[in-house]
Image: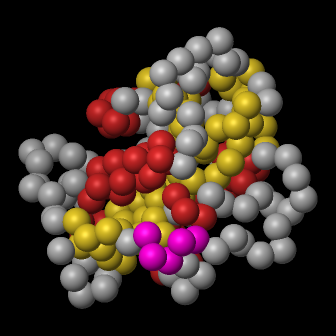
Amino acid sequence: MYEICPETPADTPEVEALYDLCFAPGRTALSSYRLREGVARVADLCLVLRDPSGTLMAAIRYWPARVAGRRVLLLGPVAVHPTAQGEGLGGLVMRDSLTRARTMGFARVLLVGDAPYYSRFGFQRLDHVQMPPPTNPDRVLGLELRPGAWVDLSGPVQREPGPSPDVQPAPDSTACVQVAHPRKPAHDPTPTSGSAADH
């Protein structure tokens, strides 16, 4: 069995190493990182997936943001270890985290990524929402966790207001779940460097 748990401070060095392994150098220079700088992650939605030996195989993070003053979840990065890509592990952490987000009362999710991959989770292009340049508009995707959450919502994505956190909020360390390894689908490639959600 695999285990999905909220990311703790002890996990963070491994998570950062996984992102460095999966994504091209300079990922922190992307426009999405300007929205994250000085903003605390949504701790209970930042998840790690470990195999039965305890090896980190996948990770996903979420950050708060705003569009037209309304609260938005900014998904990303999500990454799967290169040795396990195509096994459906990215789908496991995506679905688990989105379920948790819905339970927590979030209404909408935003990411920058490949529509053909993320459409399987219900994401669609957001024609009237703009990420900071030079983001390709075709890659700005949204998901409604509450019906109508993206209707008539438009404008630039902005940083969550508020003071910079001195300490990252601690997640609920008891919120771990055991999951079976998914069957290996014929084609389930979690996008890697250059195409994964919102590096």
Left or right: 39 as drawn, with respect to 184? right
Q: Is residue 59 left or right of residue 187?
A: right
Residue 73 in percent (x, y) is at: 60, 43
Residue sticking out furthest to the top? 152
The answer to which quarter of the image holds residue 4 is bottom left
Residue 49 figure quarter: bottom left
| Relative height, residue 42 to residue 174 (above, below) | above
Find the magenta span and give its range.
171-175
What's the residue at 56%, 42% (across, down)?
A: 105
Q: Position of residue 142 (x, y in %)?
A: 51, 29
Kindly identify the residue that appears in the image at 48 percent across and 33 percent down: 145
Provide residue 93's location: percent of width, then percent of height: 36, 57
Quadrant including the N terminus: bottom left
Residue 106's place in the image compared with 45, above or below, is above
Query: Depth check: 83 or 59 in front?
Result: 59
Magenta: main secondary structure equals: loop
Which residue sits furthest right? 163
**Residue at horizontal 30%, vertical 73%?**
3
Q: In the depicted view, which residue is nearer to us: 167 or 79?
A: 167
How is the rendered protein coloured?
secondary structure
In this rendering, does residue 175 appear at all? yes
Q: Is residue 166 above or below residue 98?
A: below
Question: Is residue 58 highlighted in magenta?
Answer: no
Total count of labels: 0
Residue lying at 16% horizontally and 43% vertically, measured from the top left? 187
* Residue 21 seen from this side: no
Give the image location of residue 23, x and y in percent. 48, 60
